[in-house]
Amino acid sequence: ALEDLGLLVVANQFSPYLSLVQLSDFTTLPETIPLSGIGGKSMVYNPASKHLYLADSTLGKDGKIYEIDVQNKTVKRTFKSLGGISAIILPEGSSQIWLTSRTENKVQVLSIADGSVLKTYDVGKKPVSLVNVLNKILVASANDSQIDVIHLDTETWRDHVKQSPIMLPEGSFPSGMTHTTDGKLVYVSAAGA
């Protein structure tokens, strides 16, 4: 929900548009935001710029991120990315988009300024979720039952260090993560074990 704009944006996976719902009375607005691809399911909002970043849900090698001006209901530009995106975040205070590719087993970092690839990390098999907590990016990989940890350098936003993964019980198949507001606890949803 984009409370500051009074809107809920609905990604219609496999449809070439986004739907808008007015939060005050939960009515669907007649306007939609057209997309050039098949839409997606992972998105993140930047309240400072009032832009939404939506990951195309294509499973091929080439993916894209839509930068959407929600106020004007237009796609401002698109960035090339890895395909098979399953999660996307915008760490607070950064000018970077972090995303996971479940088909390439990687995390990719893109610059919001120009869409360039800043860094790519190898992670466990089928990364499906990532969160930013206490200057760390945690990446849940379903097929390896592990959480990869990348320590952020919030001074430069460039020199990050990846540590050994946190192993979960065999067959856990993590599928999502969230954390408490103070960052002291991270919750992992799992489909197995």
Image (cartoon, rainbow, N blue to C red):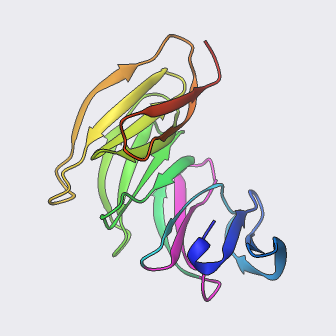
Determine if the magenta segment contains residue 58.
yes
Where is residue 56 drawn, in percent x and y? 61, 59
In the figure, 186 relative to 38: above or below?
above
Determine if the magenta segment contains residue 66.
yes
Where is residue 31 drawn, in percent x and y? 78, 83
In the figure, 172 relative to 49: above or below?
above
Where is residue 53 drawn, in percent x and y? 52, 67
Question: In screen coordinates, is 37 left or right of 53?
Answer: right
For the point 42% across and 77% down, the residue is 48
Quadrant in which residue 128 is drawn: top right
For the point 75% across and 76% down, the residue is 24
In the figure, 159 relative to 2: above or below?
above
> Which region of the structure is painted magenta?
49-74
For the point 51% across and 10% down, the residue is 170
Which image quarter holds the C terminus?
top right
Where is residue 144 drawn, in percent x and y? 48, 21
Quadrant in which residue 150 is drawn: top left
Numbered label tally: 0
For the point 70% across and 62% down, the residue is 11
Q: Nearer the viewer, residue 80 or 66?
A: 66
Which image quarter holds the N terminus?
bottom right
Q: Nearer the viewer, residue 58 or 141?
A: 141
Q: Nearer the viewer, residue 11 or 101?
A: 11
Question: In screen coordinates, is 71 left or right of 125?
Answer: right
Question: In screen coordinates, is 62 left or right of 120?
Answer: right
Toward the bottom, the furthest residue is 72
